[in-house]
Amino acid sequence: MADADLRSLPPGLAPLWRELHRRLSSGQTVSRLRVRPLDEPERIAIAEFFGMPRLPGGFAMVAMDTFEKVLFAATGSTVRAAVGRIVDPIGDRGVERLRAAMERIGIDDVRSRLRSVGWLESLEDDWTWI
């Protein structure tokens, strides 16, 4: 993905990028994105970018699979890569909260609690983030 391709995207897409960054950084799966409030230039930019037959109202609802296809066709980039370059790297607030809890009460206590509820076994191959 070339930075020039991302710079060519309309500035009216900024609310979309910010909301997408916020949602992706939650650590949850994102299948749809609702962006609001939108002013007239933002509504126009979103309608043109996604090829909508008319302008969205005060908010826009975008399916992530559609967003991936449209963005890839326009820039050759994935949504996650583009958001990371346009806004900031995508974090994971869920993992950050877990890390903070582990630091507060001690990692061994957390591991034993997670093991007792059967959650640790599902993650044992991915403990590199600790």
Image (cartoon, rainbow, N blue to C red):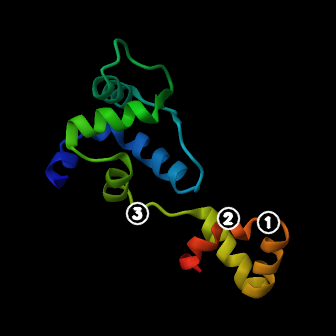
Estimate the x, y position of residue 34 in percent, counting from the top left. 53, 33
Q: Are marks 1 and 2 in contact (CB under 8 Å)?
A: yes
Amino acid type for the residue under numbered disc 1? Gly
Q: Residues within 10 Å of mark 2 (few under 14, many from 20)?
A: few
Q: Secondary structure at mark 1?
A: loop
Q: Residue 53 at x, y = what percent?
A: 34, 12
Task: Identify the residue at horizontal 49%, vertical 45% (top origin).
Answer: 19
State the image quarter where residue 98 is shown.
bottom right
Amino acid type, residue under disc 3 in the picture = Pro
Kindly identify which residue carries mark 3: 89
Name the mark nearer the viewer: 3 or 2.
Answer: 2
Residue at numbered disc 1:
118
- Could you tell me which residue is drawn at 36 percent across and 58 percent down? 84
Q: Residue furthest top?
A: 53
Callouts 3 and 1 close, C-beta under 8 Å: no
Between 20 and 66, the one lying in front of the other is 66
Front: mark 3 or 1: 1
Which quarter of the rendering shows the C terminus?
bottom right
At which x and y percent is residue 50? 33, 26
Mark-to-mark CA distance, 3 and 1: 31 Å
Q: Which amino acid is tagged 2?
A: Ser
Q: Residues within 10 Å of mark 1 (few under 14, many from 20)?
A: few
Count how many numbered circles sit on residues in the image: 3
Task: State the SS at label 2.
Answer: helix
**Apparent side of residue 69 relative to residue 89 in the rendered image (left or right):** left
Q: Nearer the viewer, residue 17 or 57?
A: 17
Residue indicated by mark 2: 122
Q: Earlier in the sequence, mark 3 or mark 1?
A: 3
